[in-house]
Amino acid sequence: MALRSLNLPGVGTKYEFETDKGDTVAIFFTKTGIIQMYTLQKGCKTPSAAEMSPVEARRLGNILSGAIIEADQESVEIAFSALADLRITIHTFFVTPAFVGKTIEDLQIRAKTGATVIAVCRHDRNIINPPPTFAFEEGDAALVIGESDQIKKFESEIMVK
């Protein structure tokens, strides 16, 4: 299954490979930014085609590689099919007045919900992997990671206080 590439002057670049079953897959990255995908099943004369934006092509790549990303406002869910269909959600929460002055440890976020604060944005500065002694300030945005049910528990048990 060798990957072949060909530079097409004025058009873009074509990548093509043949599957073990004899089907052909070709991807064109055009100079206009559009990505075209063609598949030709073994024994057929007419290919099937799909035209995608760069964002759609990246999503397809994630699906094919098993790292599915689904964005919803300030939340992203990633599925790793190679890890027993593990699905992780990453969500941004804006600190409520009840958080101000409290530490991650004070709030017992992981103990109560299973979710973890992995970053905080404060005054356009990112604080990655804040320690348990990290105290929240007004205007902070917290990036929280966990399974979907852990994020929901974080919202219902921590954010409402």
Image (cartoon, rainbow, N blue to C red):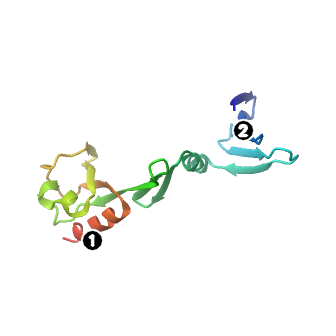
Give the residue displayed 19% in from the left and 59% down from the top: 111
Give the residue displayed 49% in from the left and 57% down from the top: 70
Viewer-nearest residue: 146 or 53: 146
Density class for disc 1 (Cα within 10 Å; few <14, some 14-19, many ≥20) is few
Q: Report the residue marked by disc 1.
A: 156
Pick the quarter of the image with the N terminus.
top right
Q: Quadrant of residue 4?
A: top right
Foreground: disc 1 or disc 2: 2
Give coordinates of residue 125: x percent, y percent: 26, 44
As drawn, is 25 to the left or to the right of 152? Answer: right
Viewer-nearest residue: 139 or 145: 145
As drawn, is 145 to the left or to the right of 107? Answer: right
Dot placed on the residue nearer the N-terminal end, 1 or 2: 2
Density class for disc 2 (Cα within 10 Å; few <14, some 14-19, many ≥20) is few
Give coordinates of residue 133: x percent, y percent: 12, 49
Q: Is residue 71 visible?
A: yes
Give the residue displayed 27% in from the left and 57% down from the top: 115
Tell me the amino acid under the disc marked 2.
Asp
What's the distance in space between the residues labelled 1 and 2, CA to CA? 50 Å
- Provide the secondary structure element on which disc 1 rests: helix
Q: Report the residue marked by disc 2.
A: 20
As drawn, is 98 to the left or to the right of 3? Answer: left
Give coordinates of residue 139: x percent, y percent: 23, 57
- Provide the secondary structure element on which disc 2 rests: loop
